[in-house]
Amino acid sequence: MKIKVLLVDDEKDFIETLAQRLEVRGFEVKTAFSGDECLDLIQEHEFDVIVLDVLMPGKDGIETLREIKSLKPLLYVIMLTGHATVETGIEGMKLGAYDYLIKPTETADLVDKITKAHHLKAEHEERICNAETKRIIKKRGW
């Protein structure tokens, strides 16, 4: 099963090139060019990992991250930040982002972080499923 990634950045050429690089590596990729578009897409589709730019006009990455985490707390988010906004990437991690990368990023580094985030998400979901199964079994006295 392919890892489902949502790339969010207002730089259209950058995000389309990155999407192509990830698709060639076997990822299923959708793109959004604003925080609002991102939020609409996560309500319509299931994603494993979101790669989210910090600096965007309108709703910035930090505000978008807050809303993502309130809508889908288990969704893993990797922040993309420029050198001047590393502190903002760290702030994002405090708000629940999985990690951050400095732009421009090497595709291999991004693939590595996406793969690790997906693995952790899958483990987290499995633990929740197992706990729910145990709760049901206990409740029914099996």
Image (cartoon, rainbow, N blue to C red):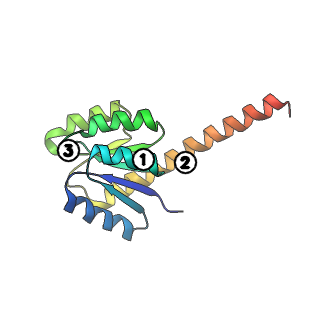
Residue sitting nearer the eye, 126 or 62: 62
Tally of numbered discs = 3
Mark 3 to mark 1: distance in Å? Answer: 18 Å
SS class, disc 2: helix
Measured from the top left, where is residue 132 in percent x and y?
A: 68, 36
Mark 2 residue type:
Ala
Q: Please identify the quarter of the rendering in which residue 128 is found.
A: top right
* Rendering coords of residue 67 (x, y %): 36, 35
Q: Secondary structure at mark 1?
A: helix
**Residue nearer the viewer, 17 or 67:** 67
Quarter placement of the C terminus = top right
Foreground label between 3 and 2: 3
Element at label 3: loop
Residue 56 tag number: 3
Residue 22's disc number: none
Residue 20, how many percent across, how many down?
Answer: 31, 68
Identify residue for label 1.
42
Which quadrant would the N terminus be assigned to in this image?
bottom right
Q: Earlier in the sequence, mark 1 or mark 2?
A: 1
Of labels 1 and 2, the one closer to you: 1
